[in-house]
Image (cartoon, rainbow, N blue to C red):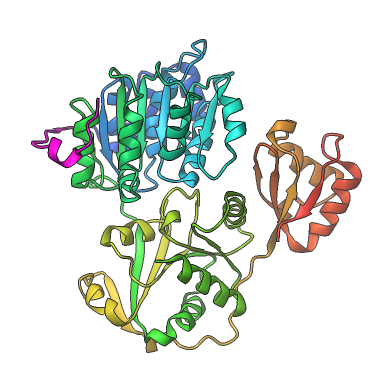
Amino acid sequence: MVGKNLKQRLKGLYFKHFTSNNPMSELKFSSLHLSKPVLNNLDELGYTQMTAVQAMSLPHVLQNKDVIAQAKTGSGKTAAFGIGLLNKIQLKQYEVQSMVLCPTRELADQVTKELRRLARFTQNIKIITLCGGSAIGPQIRSLSHPAHIVVGTPGRILKHLDKGYLDIAGLETLVLDEADRMLDMGFIDEILRVMAFVPQKRQTLFFSATFTNEIRKLSETIQNNAVNIKTLDQEQPNSIAEYFYHIDTDKMLKSIVNVFAKYEPDNAIVFANTKIDAKEVVRYLNDNGIESAAIHGDLEQYQRNDVLVKFSNHTIPVLVATDVAARGLDIKELSMVINYGLPFEKNVYTHRIGRTGRAGKTGTAVTLFAGKQSHKAKDMENSHRIFAKGSALQNAQAFILKASNGTLVIEAGKKNKLRPGDILGALTKDVGLPGKSIGKIDIYDKQSYVALERGLINKAIKGLKSKGIKGKRFSIWIMK
């Protein structure tokens, strides 16, 4: 049983270090003891070469050892634990065998999607997401038929455990994903309360971007002789050009537009420290020709989902976010990160700018700071960061940044057995739209979202209402 006073209980930590002697270039998934269906699916998904965190942690995960792994955001951590979970799931054992705790709803959704992709080889595996901000009734009904894997946020998981809707007596593996972020967000009490329901004999996996003292203490409390893995030295650092501009306080908003005009990114995330700042920034950008939307804690879950869908499918080019969005967003390519003021904590800066410059791409990070933040900015000076005065950002002359696509919403989804190919076929073959005019297609349980050239949206709506999809007609509208 976990006690209450964490700091007083935990002293004298010991971690066993693991390093790989094999060159990363030689480590393939086929070198692991994985089933043939798992390997075939990984090959179809393009997962042939392991990332550093996968190569160093998966052998231990597959041996049922506890692991605490430090690796940067976007390094392949979900597959590192997901492949291990799926490899030992017993399909005929109808109980929760694995549970993944995440700090945010966005990350939980992303983890669930990735696990389902990795589980394509497995018939009848049930993976459900339990997060706050969504109606609890459908979650309770879903839990009446036990899942094999549960992914969720600590608060909602605990609520289901307390009320008896969720039974984890048969749990074999517990994962804390982005563990440092969960502690930053104050979830320590909820995590410790969840642990009271977790079987003593289990595998516990930690994945984190940083190793803080709190992480080490929590690991010592709930893990057993954990294998300690740090891959940062073996990972290729993101290629990011970092610029810092000292701005007059009354010119901060105007300077954001000047940044867009100077660097001309295809898309960007603007990070703000408060909800008030986020609302002010998004209003100013939209008033000045830069199409944007905000995500922050005051939004309902459906509003957050709508914003994230539009940003991920490139129908809005700019997302303005508080740090709730610093992790867990499934964004493959991001041209730029802008900090509207320095973050309160130094490590948050690293998490923010780590969204850009991924997968061999070059990214740009611009930080605007003013007034009392000057001394904090001075502490961040180094040889590869460029500092300049705000006057170096010339006034934008009629700069405009708008997406060429809009988002079409179809009131049907997985529950209607819709697949992306069904929608694509209906739009190209039946409606007659060119394939290149159709962007990302996202399908959820009851709705589907299609990125489409704005000039063709009315034709698409008229055609789909007339001809339907798979012989069925659904309500269709344009997301505003």
Can you say whether 187 is above or below 257 in the image?
A: above
Question: Image point 33% across, 21% down: which residue?
Answer: 62
Q: Quadrant of the C terminus?
A: bottom right
Find residue 374 and report its image quarter.
bottom left
Can you say whether 259 is above or below 267 in the image?
A: below
Where residue 100 sits: x, y (%)? 41, 32
Residue 47 visible (yes or no) = no
Relative side of 58 to 457, left or right: left
Can you say whether 449 is above or below 317 in the image?
A: above
Find residue 234 and report its image quarter.
top left
**Residues in magenta, as a range:** 1-20
Question: What residue occupies the far left of the structure in this picture?
Answer: 12
Question: Image point 45% across, 82% down: which residue?
Answer: 255
* Frontmost residue, 205 versus 386: 205
Where residue 417 sits: x, y (%)? 73, 30
Where residue 398 sits: x, y (%)? 60, 85
Question: Image point 87% across, 49% down: which residue?
Answer: 463
Residue 201 visible (yes or no) = yes
Question: What residue occupies the far right of the structure in this picture?
Answer: 466
Q: Quadrant of the N terminus?
A: top left
Where residue 242 sits: x, y (%)? 34, 69
